[in-house]
Image (cartoon, helix red, strand yellow):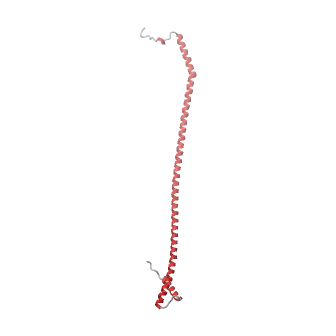
Amino acid sequence: MSPLELDLGPLLPEHLSELIAGFILFLIIFAVVWKFVVPKFEETYAERTAEIAGGIEKAEAAQAEAAAALAEYKAQLAEARNEAAKIREDAKAQAAATAAEIRELAQADAERVVASARAQIQAERAQVVQELRSEIGGLATQLAGRIVGESLEDDERARRTVDRFLVELESQPQETA
C-alpha cells in the first residue's frame, strides 16, 4: 500500500449495490422524518411560542392590573388620610364649641350665684336695717326718757321723731371705707 492510498476499512462498501441501497434508505428515512417528524417539531415549536407569547401578554396584563390596583390603593389611602384629617378638624372644632358652651354655662351659673348672693345680702341688709331701726328707736326713746325723766315709749310722736331722724341719716352721703 502506498502512502497515497487510504485504507477506509469497513467504511468502504464492497459492492456498489450496498452504496445505492444505503443512499435510498437514507432518502426514505429523510422523507419520513421530513414528512412526519418535522411538522410535529414545527407544531410543538409554534405551540410553545404561542404559550410564551400568551404568558408574556398575561404577565403584562397582570402587571397593568397590579399597577391599576396600586394606583387605586394609593387614591383610597389619600382619601382616607384626607377624611381622617377632616374628622380630626371636626373633633377639634366640636371640642372648642363644647368648651365654649361649658364656659358660657359656668359663667351663667356664676352670675346666677352672684345675683342670688346679692339678693340674699340685700334681704339681710334690709332685715338688719329694720332691726337697727327698732333698736335705735328703742334706745333713743329710753335715752330721751332718762334725760327728760319720763317714759316716752308709748308716745307716737317719739316714734315719728326717731323715724324722721333715721330717714335724714340715710339720705346723707355715706363715706366708703
Q: Nearer the viewer, residue 62 or 110?
A: 110
- Residue located at (52% from left, 56% from top): 91
- Position of residue 155 measured from the top left corner of the image (x, y, whole percent): 53, 89
- Residue located at (48% from left, 12% from top): 10
- Position of residue 68 measured from the top left corner of the image (x, y, whole percent): 54, 43
Task: Name, please, the residue furthest toward the left.
Answer: 3
- Residue located at (53% from left, 11% from top): 18
Task: Name, please, the residue furthest toward the bottom.
Answer: 149
Indicate whether 79 appears above or below 44: below
Look at the image and tell me in which quarter the C terminus lies: bottom left
Asked whether residue 171 appears in the rendered view, the answer is: no
Give the total of numbered labels.
Answer: 0
Look at the image and tell me in which quarter the N terminus lies: top left
Indicate whether 118 appears above or below 89: below
In the displayed structure image, the side of residue 55 where residue 175 appears, left or right: left
Indicate whether 62 appears above or below 153: above
Q: Nearer the viewer, residue 90 or 103?
A: 103
- Position of residue 58 measured from the top left corner of the image (x, y, whole percent): 55, 36
Indicate whether 11 appears above or below 157: above
Task: Name, please, the residue furthest toward the right.
Answer: 35
Asked whether residue 37 appears in the rendered view, the answer is: yes
- Position of residue 44 measured from the top left corner of the image (x, y, whole percent): 56, 27
